[in-house]
Image (cartoon, rainbow, N blue to C red):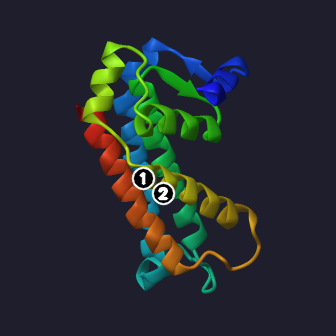
């Protein structure tokens, strides 16, 4: 809770009950990111699409598959924060709130307690988001070919798993 208070003081995290109604819209945005991720992933193997878009032969969209996969997961995470009345302006703050309120089962008030009982995250699911963030940073900022098709495929699976879990929680 100490970390969360620090983010609240720095205004990187804001308590806002009005944001609760936006949770489904953040989830919708996460789903749109999944669509973009799939388009980019399919582009690598679709010769017709590459020709139509005049994509260079050496173009590899896998790094952007990782980026959009991460943002699908992150936006879904933001939907969970919204559900419990938080806005986040910082990726690390978002991870802290998820860990504190969904993994560690801390109680804020009766409404949050009911939410937590029906929607507990396992530590591994939070780590998937953290792992995706790291891979996104490598993909976005590295000039080496560390981002391979296998990483992109793993991010795709993790992104769907994470967004689906968030959707399950939001709908409850």
Which residue position is annotated with label 1? Answer: 125
Q: Is residue 35 visible?
A: no
Residue drawn at x 63%, y 40% is 92
Residue 161 image-quadrant placement? bottom left
- Point out the image quarter for the N terminus: top right
Q: Residue 85's spot in the image, x, y percent? A: 45, 20
- Count the numbered circles shown: 2
Residue sitting at 38 percent across and 65 percent down? 157
Between 3 and 137, the one lying in front of the other is 3
Position in image of residue 53 (x %, y %):
52, 72
- When the figure is inspected, residue 143 is found, relative to residue 94, above or below; the finding is below
* Left/right of residue 168 with respect to residue 161 in the rendered view: left
Classify mark 2: residues with Cα within 10 Å, few (<14), some (14-19) or many (20+): some
x, y percent for residue 87: 54, 25
Q: Is residue 128 left or right of residue 6?
A: left
**Residues at circles 2 and 1 in contact by the CB criterion of under 8 Å:** yes
Is residue 4 something one can see in this rendering?
yes
Name the disc covering residue 38, or none.
Answer: none
Find the distance from the CA under tag 2 to the CA under tag 1: 5 Å
| Mark 1: secondary structure | helix
Classify mark 2: helix, strand or loop. Answer: helix
Residue 19: image quadrant is top left
User: Looking at the picture, how far across and down is residue 152, in whole percent?
Assistant: 50, 71
Q: Is residue 64 above or below residue 91?
A: below
Which residue in the structure is indicated by mark 2? 128
Q: Residue at x 42, y 52 (%)?
A: 125
Q: Is residue 30 above or below residue 128?
A: above
């Amino acid at each position: 809770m100490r970390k969360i208070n620090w983010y609240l003081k720095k205004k990187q995290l804001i308590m806002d009950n009005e944001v609760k109604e936006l949770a489904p819209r953040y989830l919708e945005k996460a789903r749109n990111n999944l669509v973009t991720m799939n388009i980019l992933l399919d582009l690598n193997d679709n010769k017709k699409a590459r020709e139509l878009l005049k994509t260079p032969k050496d173009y590899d969209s896998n790094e952007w598959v990782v980026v959009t996969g991460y943002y699908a997961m992150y936006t879904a995470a933001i939907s969970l924060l919204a559900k419990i009345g938080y806005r986040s302006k910082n990726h690390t703050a978002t991870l802290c709130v998820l860990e504190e309120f969904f993994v560690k089962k801390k109680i804020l008030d009766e409404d949050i307690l009911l939410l937590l009982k029906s929607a507990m995250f396992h530590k591994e699911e939070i780590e998937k988001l953290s792992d995706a963030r790291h891979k996104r940073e490598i993909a976005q900022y590295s000039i080496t070919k560390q981002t391979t098709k296998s990483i992109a495929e793993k991010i795709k699976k993790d992104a769907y798993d994470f967004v689906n879990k968030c959707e399950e929680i939001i709908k409850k």
